[in-house]
Image (tube, helix red, strand yellow):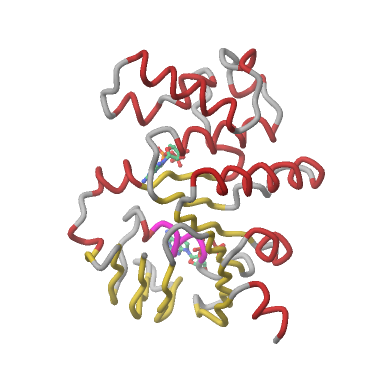
Amino acid sequence: MIEFKSVTKTYRDGTTAVHDLSLVIPSDKITVIVGPSGCGKTTTLRMINRMLEPTSGQITWDRNPLRNIRKTQLRREMGYVIQSGGLFPHRTVLENIQTVPHLLGWKKDRSQGRAEELLAMVGLESRLANRYPSQLSGGQQQRVGVARALAADPRVLLMDEPFSAVDPVVRADLHEQFLEIQRQVGKTIVMITHDIDEAIKLGDQIAIMRVGGVLAQVGSPQQLLEE
Ligand code: ADP
Ligand code: ADP
């Protein structure tokens, strides 16, 4: 469980991106943070792996203050997926997926075997393994981004608008695949989107943010639809 306790983030120029946020992110479920552009979603997500630090308040992970957990450990235990996959352009698909295992010093056989396994898991044919990102469609790049984030078997997956750059048909396909992967691996997932329909489709828990970085509502899709 990841817990935000009265977290505020004010940037150096005085912009308060997140205001007094208290939120429990349960383990092994999908939490979707939804809200309009500029409401503080990315800032919230980036405080979870300490790319950003809160200005005040505290975040804990299984009751340990994040502040006490090394960033290198967080990088290993929290996969990160961004829009369009965020792949390294000069690395092949297989090399991209092996990025974190490589940093962790895994043996080549092990990391390559793992990358091939993940390629299959995200529904990509093995013939794509040696292509470069520019030789893939947007949807394929996004799948590789998810595979890369899962490579070192992180406990947490942080996803910043992972499906928004692909067309609706591909997106629906990626949604199904993503839910299927989650049924298999059962990670703690925090995803952000500006699309409420996507949030309702994918989230076990939905947190709605408003401009000003304020949490407006939290609940299951059912609870939110009933209100
Ligand atoms: P979202 O992901 O919901 O679009 P962000 O977290 O990116 O929102 O941004 C929240 C607010 O903080 C916005 O007003 C944005 O302009 C501002 N912001 C984001 N990053 C910075 C920064 N590095 N410096 C100053 N303001 C920022
Ligand atoms: P950029 O400045 O283009 O965002 P970065 O060097 O910050 O590039 O990141 C390169 C890639 O590494 C990103 O696409 C992102 O997926 C991944 N990345 C960046 N920061 C982290 C992090 N804290 N944890 C995991 N992956 C990260």
Residue at x 69%, y 42% (from the top left corner): 174
From the viewer's perspective, is residue 61 above or below residue 217?
A: above
Quadrant of the rendered image containing residue 216:
bottom right
* Residue 92 horizontal/vertical position (percent): 52, 17
* Residue 169 horizontal/vertical position (percent): 82, 43
* Residue 215 horizontal/vertical position (percent): 51, 79
Left or right: where does residue 59 sit relative to residue 15?
Answer: left
Residue at x 22%, y 64% (from the top left corner): 64
Left or right: where does residue 21 sit relative to residue 121?
Answer: left
Quadrant of the rendered image containing residue 52:
bottom left
Q: Residue 182: within the magenta?
A: no
Camera-side residue: 53 or 205? Answer: 205
* Residue 155 horizontal/vertical position (percent): 38, 48
Residue at x 49%, y 50% (from the top left corner): 186
Q: Which secondary structure is most common in the magenta stretch? A: helix
Start-end of magenta stretch: 41-46
Residue at x 50%, y 80% (from the top left corner): 214
Please identify the quadrant where the C terminus is shown: bottom right
Number of marks: 0
